[in-house]
């Protein structure tokens, strides 16, 4: 099972709010995920990431998407 760290969309119409989740790459974008790692609100640029859990998933081989990789760099979790 290949795991990815990616965004899942939440929130109202035209007011998106995203969760950063660890999910099997074959699942749908908003499908059942393994763990909620953090949140991102693009309207206010608010970013909350559980760094210990993100590092755990990266350590066991999870691949972040480009957007999540950028967010992890912003929080200085990865270089």
Image (cartoon, rainbow, N blue to C red):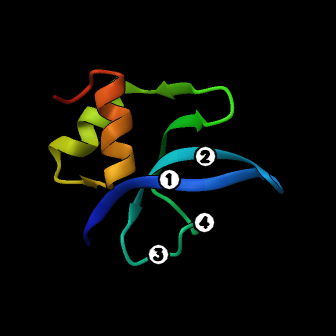
Secondary structure at numbered mark 2: strand
Q: Earlier in the sequence, mark 4 or mark 1?
A: 1
- Total numbered labels: 4
Give me the C-alpha separation between circle 4 and circle 2.
10 Å
What is the crowding at mark 2: few (fewer than 14 residues within 10 Å), some, or many (at least 20)? some
At a point 25% along the width and 69% down the height, the residue shown is 2
Quadrant of the image occupied by residue 23: bottom left
Give me the C-alpha separation between circle 4 and circle 1.
9 Å
Q: Mark 2 or 3, which is nearer the eye?
A: 2
Give me the C-alpha separation between circle 2 and circle 3.
17 Å
Q: Relative to residue 10, is residue 12 drawn left or right?
A: right
Give the labeled residue for mark 4. Answer: 30
Give the labeled residue for mark 2. Answer: 18
Which percent across, then down, holds residue 59?
16, 42
Give me the C-alpha separation between circle 4 and circle 3.
8 Å
Front in this rendered view, residue 67 or 30: 67
Proximity of marks 4 and 1: CB atoms separated by less than 8 Å: no
Give the labeled residue for mark 3. Answer: 27
Give me the C-alpha separation between circle 3 and circle 1.
12 Å
Secondary structure at numbered mark 1: strand
Q: Quadrant of the C terminus?
A: top left
Proximity of marks 1 and 2: CB atoms separated by less than 8 Å: yes
Give the labeled residue for mark 1. Answer: 7
At a point 64% along the width and 56% down the height, the residue shown is 9
Secondary structure at numbered mark 4: loop
């Amino acid at each position: 099972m290949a795991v990815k760290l990616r965004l899942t969309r939440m929130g109202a119409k035209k007011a998106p709010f995203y969760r950063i989740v660890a999910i099997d790459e074959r699942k749908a974008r908003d499908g059942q995920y393994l763990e909620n790692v953090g949140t991102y609100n693009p309207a206010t640029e608010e970013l909350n990431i559980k760094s210990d859990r993100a590092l755990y998933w990266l350590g066991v081989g999870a691949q972040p998407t480009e957007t999540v990789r950028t967010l992890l760099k912003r929080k200085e979790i990865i270089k």
